[in-house]
Image: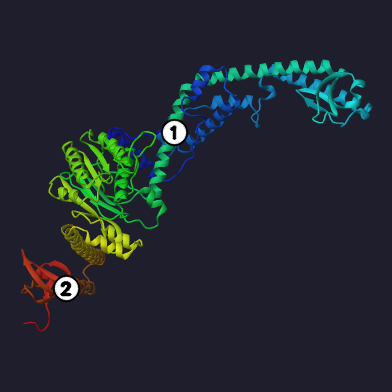
Amino acid sequence: MTYRPFTRKQDAEYELKRVEKIIKFGESADFSIPADPGVLREKLAVSAYLPVEDIIKLKYWFNSIGVLKKKFNKSSLREYFIKLGEYSELTDEINRIFDGYDQVRDDASERLLKIRKEKRRIKQTIEETLNRILARRSSLFTDTTIIKRNQRFVLPVKRNFKNDFKGIIHSYSNSGETVFIEPMEITEYSARLFELSAQEQEEIERVLKSLTDQIRLRIEDIEADIEAVIDLDLLFAKAKYARDLDAAMPVFDEQINIVNGFHPILKTVETEVVPLNLKIGSDKKILLISGPNAGGKTVVLKTVGLIALMAKCGMFIPVEEGSTIPFFDRMYADIGDEQSIESHLSTFAAHIKQIKEALSAPSNSLVLLDELMSQTSVEEGSALAIAILERLSQRGATVLATTHNENLKIFVSTRTDMVNAGMEFTDRPTYRLILGIPQPSNAIRLAGELGINHGVLENALKRLDKEKVSMNNLFSDLSKELKEVQQERAKLNRLIKEYESKLEELNLKKKRELDELKAKYKRELIQSKRSIERLIKELKKEGPKPEKVHEMRKFFDEALHEDDESRVPYFPSIGEIVRIRSLKKTGQVVEEHAGKFKVSLENIYYWVEPKELESLPGDG
């Protein structure tokens, strides 16, 4: 079967939601099918009955469907399995006809049972007769074993005695010393047994036809469920693959924004993979990637292409959250060497053939061009490459191309709809993509690292165009400066995150202290209320006795009166150190607004009423 990408974005998004649901469910499932889609329907169209192996496969498949429906009946995935058919009647009928060894039972029909009983009786008679002959004339035989040849019972007679033994000769041994003869005493029984075997086969076929007719009535349901199970199997496979890759759900948008993406296959074979970070604005749809050989340019193209294709197929993609990818209508790729001797295609002709198709791409297309026009002369290759990029830009396609061509890099730098990028190279390739700055090929340097003679390298350096050398050095310097800026930006982002984390921590601490203070006052208020209610009850019961009046005066003096007198509003100056009565802590007044004062306590700020403040002893 061939799996094709979705042609509509809404279909892909619906598929992704289904995959997400299975990922969240967290359990796996085992799926199987009795035959490829349409195969059983085709067999039934030309055959009176299905082969036994197909019927047995159907039986096991019916059972597996029942198990799946039961397993997921009360789960969040119930809707995916509830539509599968119910085949218990067919399963019961198959089990009635076949035994545990997948053989047709004797009692599959009354006639079959009668035939097999008769066959067993005749076979027993034949064996008893042959055993008597073997015992009575044992010297005539090379072995005292009953043998079957061509579905007939025979005895192994020595060649010298074949004329002394009456019967039908069926065959000779390889050596010719043994003659296999069917004795005359059993020929009638053997003929009857042969006749019964034919009747048995005829009856088995009749039973299978009857069973197949019942299957034929349900064939459309069966074929539909085969398709449904394949769909479910694919969904669960996508979910497992997403979990294995720790992939994220694609978000379709007009621009490419890949955050820490990676090639899915590369991730499975390499322990450390440099992630791809690529953001192409909607106003710059053509990206030209340069840099050293083996620096990762082609991997970038393949990674973007695979991520886009996986998204179109309704698969999670190997990127981090926040990544976006367009839903491309068409995708074109010219990667690798398509040279063909059989088709009389040169390397250049093969690339032109691929690019020719891409030049007719609709606006919402992704075009991947590896080593654009590097198969011919620099002058003509540059001209062709520029014309190709301009044409694709006019058609509104999104293009990622790789090159070593300096002229092409300069051309792209002059265009507002195109952008240069390069694979970083320090003392070695880092496989990190840098946007905005093209990168030199560093071919001579890499050749030296690979062992090319130093004299050859010196000769090559002398022959380089000085302007291009200077330009390459400029590219390298710009890359270093950009890297330093990015590192500083990353450092600043880390500091911002640390500050936000500390601020959140302080706010939480402030909230906890305020909650504790509220709880404390609530407890004190409840206690005071209970004490007042108790005193009132006692006054009502006992009257205003002197000792009771004294107790009440003491309570109000301690619990209330002292507070009223001591909490005279205090209006401090900005910068003054004051004491917050309720917290029993000191802090500095930093601001006044609407009659309240903002007091700093250990980098936590409180807005406090004047009556909650008091001056410290010794302050003037």
Total numbered badges shown on the rendered structure: 2
Callout 1 secondary element: helix
The answer to whether residue 328 is above or below residue 182 is below
What is the three-letter code of the residue carrying label 2? Arg
Q: Position of residue 590 (x, y in %)?
A: 9, 71
Displayed quadrant of residue 432 = bottom left
Displayed quadrant of residue 155 = top right
Q: Name the residue under label 1.
A: 230
What is the three-letter code of the residue carrying label 1? Ile
Whether residue 321 is visible: yes
Q: In the image, what residue occupies the spot 22% across and 62% down?
A: 462
* Left or right of residue 46: residue 565: left
The answer to whether residue 566 is above or below residue 207 is below
Q: Nearer the viewer, residue 274 or 472?
A: 472
Q: Residues within 10 Å of mark 1 (few under 14, many from 20)?
A: some
Disc sitting over residue 29 in the figure: none
Instruction: Answer with mark 2 or mark 1, whichever residue precedes in sequence.
Output: 1
The quadrant of the picture occupied by the C terminus is: bottom left
Picture colour scheme: rainbow
* Left or right of residue 531: residue 25: right
Q: Position of residue 555 (x, y in %)?
A: 21, 72
Q: Mark 2 points at which residue?
A: 581
Q: Position of residue 471 (x, y in %)?
A: 17, 58
Q: In the image, what residue occupies the spot 39% across and 42% down?
A: 238
Q: Position of residue 119 (x, y in %)?
A: 77, 20
**Mark 2 or mark 1, whichever is nearer to me:** 1
Whether residue 132 is visible: no
Q: Residues within 10 Å of mark 2 (few under 14, many from 20)?
A: some
Callout 2 secondary element: loop
